[in-house]
Image: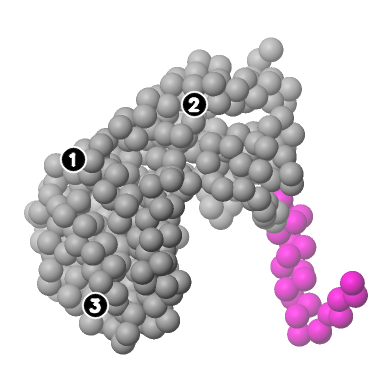
Amino acid sequence: MIIFMDDKLVWIEKDLDSLKEQGLFKNIKTIESAIGPEIVIEGKTLLNFCSNNYLGFANDDRLKKAAKEAIDKYGVGPAAVRTIAGTMSLHRELENKLAEFKRVEDIIALPGGLLANVAAIPVLVGEGDVIFSDELNHASIIDGCRLTKAEVIRFTHGDTNDLEKKLKGYVGSGKKLIITDGVFSMDGDIAPLPEIVDVAEKYSAMVYVDDAHGEGVLGSHGKGVVDHFSLHGRVDVEIGTLSKAFGVVGGFVAGKKLIIELLRQKARPFLFSSATTPADVGASIEAVKVLEESDAPVKKLWENADYFKGKMGEMGFDIGHSQTPIVPVMLGDVTSAQNFSKSLFENGVFAVALGYPTVPMGKARIRVMISAAHTKEQLECGLEVFRKVGTELGILSK
């Protein structure tokens, strides 16, 4: 195939070449199977240690059945935005079920977790207001903040003393919004939410938590970080996703009725995005039902995670200070991480390298994601591959 380069696009080619030279170009793998503890890539069956499928719901028979039933009743798509002709009874059922599950007054569902942040932040604050944002917050929070005209003040990661110092030093009269991830997806640590809430109440600031990696993982039956710390009613806004532990796709904003109603009136991604498909909504409702009935999947997730992390630490890997089933295998430079990932793949394990800008320069890693669906035998097999590759590449001593 011959590609003719338009002169005005030469800069794009140079930009792509620069990414390749820095080792930051992403070669995206295509998965040829359902998402589970094992997947097929390039015709090869591999152990999957790369997915956010915490509870194994992505290929769960109960969720698949619910999705099929939703299609049979509601069709394949709403073909409209929620505010015109896209809100089906199924969408309201999901919102009501989630609100009951999360123990909040109301919820607004959106097509994605990123859209939830982009929807909520610009409605809550604007010109003359200030956002206090943890320096390691997710990119979607950063994007949501950029869409506002509010001042953004970053505080040191997880440091409530620094947060209070900056709140105390703020002299403006506008609204104050503190934003933090609940679980930080690259390191697996949990935000010190009780201390953040205490500081917020002292300075009359709203608290906003993105709990994408806490949903289905923390709290009773996977209710999330607010439940984990028993802070119901003291956190103003919770952002959740349906595309990780719930195994489907979509996002939501949870909180007080007044806040959610305002979002229904003004949040642009809600006003101008087509509604989520019936299949996705039906499967999401079923995921909530499964968790309401039993916390066995959550307990199994933690059992697997504790076992894997313990063994990785015993082998001598640097796995950071994760407090969750996220296991960062710290390797430093991106080339080392990419070589490690390639060797894992060759030995039957899928776990990709993460480098800048996903993580800071010099902190490249393999992020291992443990699932409740992994068997003990699969974990043992994966651990042996990590030992083999780590030894061969000189990460572990022989």
Front in this rendered view, residue 303 or 328: 303
Residue 376: give its label: none
| Mark 2 residue element | loop
Residue type for callout 2: Thr
User: Does 3 appear in magenta?
Assistant: yes
Which residue is at 58% across, 52% downward? 356
The mark found on residue 264 in the picture is 3
Q: Name the secondary structure under disc 1.
A: loop
Q: Nearer the viewer, residue 180 or 74?
A: 74
Q: Position of residue 41 (x, y in %)?
A: 69, 45
Point out the frontmost of discs 3 and 1. Answer: 3
Q: Which residue is mark 2?
A: 375
Left or right: residue 251 compared with residue 3: left
Q: Which residue is mark 1?
A: 229
Task: Say which quarter of the image contains residue 133.
Answer: bottom left
The mark lying in front, picked from 2 and 1, is: 2
Q: Which of the two discs, 2 and 3, labels the residue nearer the N terminus?
A: 3
Q: Position of residue 100 (x, y in %)?
A: 16, 54
Quarter of the rendering containing residue 350: top right
